Image (cartoon, rainbow, N blue to C red):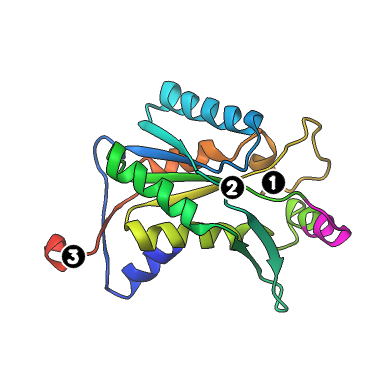
Amino acid sequence: EGYALDQFASGDWGLLPVRTGGHRIGLLLDSGMSQDLVTRHLQAADAARATLGINVCDYVLTSEPVGVSLAVSPSGASYGTLDNPDTLLDAANRLVNEANCTAIAVVCRFPEDETDEDVASTKAYVEGGGMDPVGGAEAIISHLLTIELKIPVAHAPANDVSAKPEEGVSPKAAAEELGFTFLPCVLAYLHRAPLILTDRGERR
């Protein structure tokens, strides 16, 4: 997660490899998702448990929709805003304090492409020639939770995915076109993400 790496690079936080076992991962789902999308992501978590041995120990739905909006800065970088960040924080704290989760995988409902410019931006990214239109908003979500909880956090966006394959997909983006969710790769790498050490005494 970018914020944790910044803190590590500045010498303020330490990172400790997870050499055995793995994290107790809590799955945080945006209640703004449709029931079909929720089901898809719970199935992905079940598959990760059954085939990879990943400990997705609990999940929660936010009490209210997160309300993610996307935008592009004048310099061409993507970013986003959250209508209700407190609902994310509340749900994440429940996973940590009630389920003893040591890492969190977050899935928020992201808006569909609404304008010709949105469609063109996504098409450029998929074809390997443009910026990631959702990456900036994803970073805001993971930064928010990492700053608050100081544990590993990773995010997967959720949108309505067509079963029809796209033509002309770049090899760099091909893995993102294979399924109905981005969650499996998030769980696979979050499972062994380094522990975050914020106390200098812990790093001795």
79 displayed left or right of 154: right
Q: Nearer the viewer, mark 3 or mark 1?
A: 3
- What residue occupies the far bottom of the structure in this picture? 74
Q: Quadrant where the C terminus lies?
A: bottom left
Q: Secondary structure at mark 2?
A: loop
Per the model, the C-alpha gap separating discs 3 and 1 is: 42 Å
**Residue that carries the numbered disc 1 in the rendered image:** 171
- What residue occupies the far front of the structure in this picture? 63
- The amino acid marked with disc number 2 is Pro
Residue 199 bears which disc, if any? 3
Residue drawn at (16%, 68%) of the image: 200
Q: Secondary structure at mark 3?
A: loop
**Residue 9 spot, x, y in % from top left:** 34, 71
- What residue occupies the far right of the structure in this picture? 116
Q: Which residues are magenta?
A: 113-121
**Residue 72 spot, x, y in % from top left:** 71, 69
- The amino acid marked with disc number 3 is Asp
Residue drawn at (32%, 75%) of the image: 10
**Residue 82 spot, x, y in % from top left:** 58, 60
Residue drawn at (51%, 49%) of the image: 155
- What residue occupies the far top of the structure in this picture? 50
Whether 41 is drawn above or below 30: the answer is: above
